[in-house]
Amino acid sequence: MKIAFHTLGCKVNSYETEALERLFTSRGYTVVNAKELADIYVINTCTVTNTADQKSRKAIRQAIKRNPDAIVAVIGCYSQVSSEDVAAIEGVDIIMGTSERERLVERVEGFMRERKRILAIKEMTRYKQFDALNVTSFSENTRAFVKIQDGCNQYCSFCIIPYARGPVRSRPKEAIIAEAKTLLSNGYKEIVLTGIHTGGYGSDLKEVSFYDLLKELSELDGLKRLRVSSIEINQLSEEIITLMAKNPVFARHLHIPLQSGSDAILRKMKRRYTLAEYRAKIAAIRQAIPSIAITTDIIVGFPGETDDDFNAIKATLSACAFSELHVFPYSKRSGTLAAQSKDQVHGTIKSYRVNELLQLNETLANRYIETLKASTESVLFERCDGESCRGHSSHYVTYKVYTDQDLVNQIHPVKVVK
């Protein structure tokens, strides 16, 4: 039978879809593109914003329309927090949330036998188990992603994810090391650690910390590059920074969400740091690793954000000298504290501020790229078209090399010409 997956949202969802694909292919199913005719459609949903909910519903309806006779399974964050809305869509056969996804094959085959809708949603706020999913290869990525934890304990005022994913659950270190070794033996050279709250790894364990995991992974034979996908500023301890500085296997790049450059807005967001603490830690990182590229997330137009707050945001972003900004206009998310705020910022003002930050991003990115001129960088090539190859450096800068060679999954030193 043919099965198609449609994945929305973050890299964790993508990882989980890859793992589910392997489970189905091991049982004899054939994976096809989501736009093709299939016997089974799995929609792995996202709920980070109301817009993400809309995209998830659209993907569900498209699958049902493509083949009304197909089995349609909806899983993930949207179905976790809005299972009743998913159940109201005629044609959905299986509804699962963010737990026990390793049982999806069992439930699909159960539906084939019984032909009765399956609703399997567990309450996540007290869920303690790290669900066992495993990946040995990736269908499209040259870099290998390894999920090390699930859940989040932060409860920022704008975010629904702790309700969708539950509390922090760390994957056993032995399972992470085993998966990393398998991926390396299968030819992958770069491993990217990912999770819902990656730096929270080990906070629920007694004898293992995030530092312990990083140290053991960094010593694996065959590993050329180890990258942390995203980490909060207050989880970058001095010992982790020192470890990264001393071992060249760590990518010279960190993505550290800031979210706002105003202390007043950070308090409203329920972030757990001040601007002074954030900037001091950035300075310490740059002192330890002078060439490092630091990227960040910023939310514009959060409820109550004044012109003075926005000017503070611009000043902070410039002072931190980020190499790239991921700019998001604040979007109401039903069920969060911020969505109930009465001082919402008008959409026109948000659009103006977003555009201003996008211009600042271009300035900052170009300024960082200028520092790389005349340098030689190590690049892992990810795709080639017969005329050129593209890949990422350790600093997570994209490089293009004109060549007719196939350099995919090869690392080469590259001198910057322009």
Image: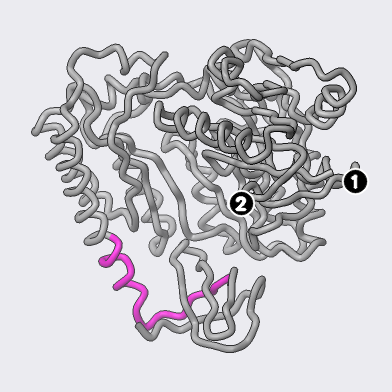
On screen, residue 22 versus residue 163, left or right, reads: right
Q: Residues within 10 Å of mark 2 (few under 14, many from 20)?
A: some
The residue at the far bottom in this view is 404
Q: Quadrant of residue 291?
A: bottom left
Give amino acid for label 1: Gly
On screen, residue 212 versus residue 343, left or right, reads: right
Give amino acid for label 2: Val
Tell me which residue sits at (37%, 46%) in the image.
296
Q: Residues within 10 Å of mark 1 (few under 14, many from 20)?
A: few
Q: Which residue is the site of mark 2?
A: 192
State the SS at label 1.
loop
Q: Quadrant of the N terminus?
A: top right
Residue 163 numbered tag: none
How far across and how far down the image is residue 60, in percent? 58, 32
Q: Which residue is the site of mark 1?
A: 28
Q: Is residue 212 visible?
A: no
Instruction: Decide: is 370 above or below 16.
Output: below
Q: Is residue 161 magenta?
A: no
The residue at the far left in this view is 307
Disc 1 to disc 2, C-alpha distance: 29 Å
How far across and how far down the image is residue 209, in percent? 64, 34
How far across and how far down the image is residue 77, in percent? 57, 26
Please report whichever mark, 1 or 2, sits nearer to the chain's N-terminal start: 1
Q: Are marks 1 and 2 in contact (CB under 8 Å)?
A: no
Q: Quadrant of residue 45?
A: top right
Tell me which residue sits at (72%, 26%) in the image.
130
Q: Which residues are magenta?
A: 365-381
The residue lying toward the viewer, choosing from 259 and 208, is 259
